[in-house]
Image (cartoon, grey):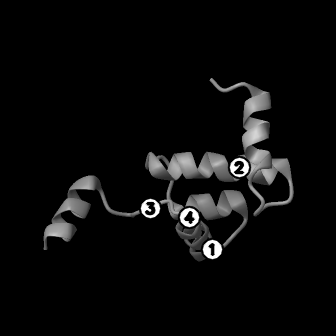
Amino acid sequence: MMNRTITETIAAELQIFKTVNQKENFLFIIGALLTQVISIQKAAEVMEMEPEMILQLLELMGIEFSYLSEDDISIERNW
């Protein structure tokens, strides 16, 4: 598990949000989304934002996110 000081240092680098808590929550939801533990709707609830804003932030950060499974993505790319 990551040291609290390390997570705070990483979170401090996120200029998008004002508080360390918001920054840490955003880092958490990125991980949870990418591992498909939560939905984009739940991420939006945690961040108190609209789902479209979450998707826009991910896109601006260059983080690829898809609602599709890996198999669905493969099928779609080859379609």
Residue 44: x and y, percent? 63, 64
Mark 4 to mark 3: distance in Å?
A: 7 Å
Q: CA distance from mark 1 to mark 4?
A: 9 Å
Q: In this figure, which residue is indicated by the disc labeled 3?
A: 65
Mark 1 vs mark 4: which is more N-terminal?
A: 1
Q: Residue at coordinates 64% horizontally, 74% vertically from top-left?
A: 50
Residue type, label 1: Met
Secondary structure beneath disc 1? Answer: helix
Residue 66 at x, y = what percent?
Answer: 39, 63
Residue bearing mark 4: 58
Mark 4 residue crowding within 10 angstroms, few (<14) / some (14–19) / many (20+) = some
Q: Residue at x 81, y 48 (%)?
A: 21
Q: Nearer the viewer, mark 4 or mark 2?
A: 4
The residue carrying mark 2 is 25
Residue 66 vertical placement versus 25 (above, below): below
Instruction: For marks 2 and 3, give the one nearer the viewer.
Output: 3
Foreground residue among 17 and 25: 17
**Left or right of residue 11, residue 35 in this image:** left
Q: Are marks 4 and 3 in contact (CB under 8 Å)?
A: yes
* Element on which disc 3 rests: loop
What residue is rendered at 51% in x and 63% in y? Answer: 62
**Label annotation for residue 53:** 1
Label 1 crowd (10 A; few <14 / some 14-19 / many >=20): few
Say which label, 2 or 3, has the lower sequence index: 2
What's the distance in space between the residues labelled 4 and 2, CA to CA?
Answer: 14 Å
Q: Amino acid at mark 4?
A: Leu
Q: Nearer the viewer, mark 1 or mark 4?
A: 4
**Could you tell me if the residues under marks 4 and 2 are in contact, i.e. CB atoms within 8 Å?**
no
Could you classify mark 2 by the number of other residues whose Cα lies within 10 Å: few (under 14), some (14-19), or many (20 or more)?
A: some
First in sequence: mark 3 vs mark 1: 1
